[in-house]
Each structure stands twice: as C-alpha cells, then as structure tokens.
Image (tube, rainbow, N blue to C red):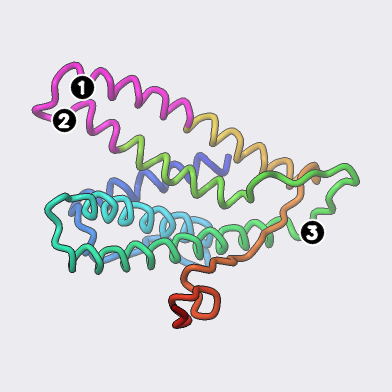
Amino acid sequence: MFTDKANSIFKEVIEKYHVIDSVDQEFSNPYDSKSQAIEHLLYRKCWIDTVQWHYEDIIRDPQIDPVAALTLKRQIDASNQDRTDMVEYIDSYFLEQYKNVTPKNNATINTESPAWGVDRLSILALKVYHMHVETIRDGASEEHKATCQNKLNILLEQQVDLSTAIDTLLNDIKEGDKYMKVYKQMKMYNDDELNPVLRGEK
C-alpha cells in the first residue's frame, strides 16, 4: 500500500528532525530525486511540515519580540508556499503514474486530489508524534497523560482511516473508477498583481 510507505517516511522525517530539534538545522534528503522520486517528495514534504509545526509553536510565544515575530511570519508564509508547491509535485507524480488509465464512463472525481490527502496524512503524523510525547512527558500529571492518551488513540484511528481512504482513492484511479483533476495554485494574497496592498493601492 502506498500509505505504508508514506507513513514510514513521515515517521523517519519526524524522528530525524527531533534529534537536533531546531528549525534552523540543515536539511538533507536521503532519497534520490530520480530513482526514488516519490520517496524524495514525501520526505521533503514532511520536513517542510515539521519545520512549520515548530515555527507555529515559536510564534505563539507571548514574550516574542515583535520584530522577530514579523520575520517568523514571513518564514511561515514562505513555508506555506513550499508546502503547496510540494503538494503539486506529488500530484504531478500521480498524474504521470496514471496517465495511461482511461476513466470509465461513470468515473467520478474526488473532493480532493491524492496529494492533498497526503498533506493531511503528513500533518497527522506530526500530531501523533507530539501527542505521544505528551503521554510520557516528565512533570505532566497523570490526568494530563490519560487525556492525551485518549486523544492519541483517536489520532491513530484517524491515521488508519485516512490511510485507507488514500489507498482506496489511488486504486480507484488506477482502475478508472475515479479520475484526477488538479487545479494549480490561484493564491491571491502573495501575488503582486492580485493583492491590492502589494500592488500599492490604498
């Protein structure tokens, strides 16, 4: 199953990040971009998500310096763009994989493309990791640990369900029961011509 591979790589990424546990650490992708294309994309995608997860933690510090917060906000914006770019690269991989499949006459489209499902799966892997940390955190009360364990159980169930849904979607596309239709980015807020502030209008 595709998601077995994806979940394994996401776990690998998150554990690798937390060895140093710094948003400024150097990134290195162990998977070759040509011979291991999808593995390479999945690893990069989850690394972006993992760094951004910690950006979001840092920016919520009530004592953060306003200038530092603005700089970090720009980094989060750039990370969001990278994240969206990676989703499109992953969808391009799937489009190439299934380019010779002829959809059946009654084939239907899904509410989201496969890669946006993968995006959710990557974020879910981060939730699972960090919720697990809370179940064993030194200094946390037993009540807190029990509450977090209940939440972790739900997240793990959700991970199974989402993985199943993604694998089912990919199989349906392969069999022609579903078809892919990808809409490229049409973001307006970071476009010099579409955002009136960036365009200079008052």
State which tag comes first along the sequence, 1 or 3.
Answer: 3
What amino acid is labelled 1 in the image?
His
Q: Which mark is residue 144?
A: 1
Which dot, 1 or 3, sits closer to the camera? Answer: 1
Q: Residue furthest left?
A: 139
- State the residue at coordinates (48%, 42%): 121
Image quarter where the C terminus lies is bottom left
Percent coordinates x, y for residue 89 in the rendering: 56, 64
Q: Residues within 10 Å of mark 2 (few under 14, many from 20)?
A: few
Q: Are marks 1 and 2 in contact (CB under 8 Å)?
A: yes
Q: Give the magenta range.
A: 130-158
Real-space Cα separation, disc 1 to disc 3, in angstroms: 52 Å
- State the residue at coordinates (73%, 41%): 172
Q: Which residue is mark 3?
A: 100
Real-space Cα separation, disc 1 to disc 2, in angstroms: 10 Å
Q: Is residue 194 above or below residue 4?
A: below
User: In the rendered structure, does residue 19 fall within the stretch colored magenta?
Assistant: no
- Name the foreground residue: 54 vs 160: 54
Q: Which residue is mark 2?
A: 137
What amino acid is labelled 3 in the image?
Asn
- Name the foreground residue: 195 vs 57: 195
User: In the rendered structure, does residue 138 fall within the stretch colored magenta?
Assistant: yes
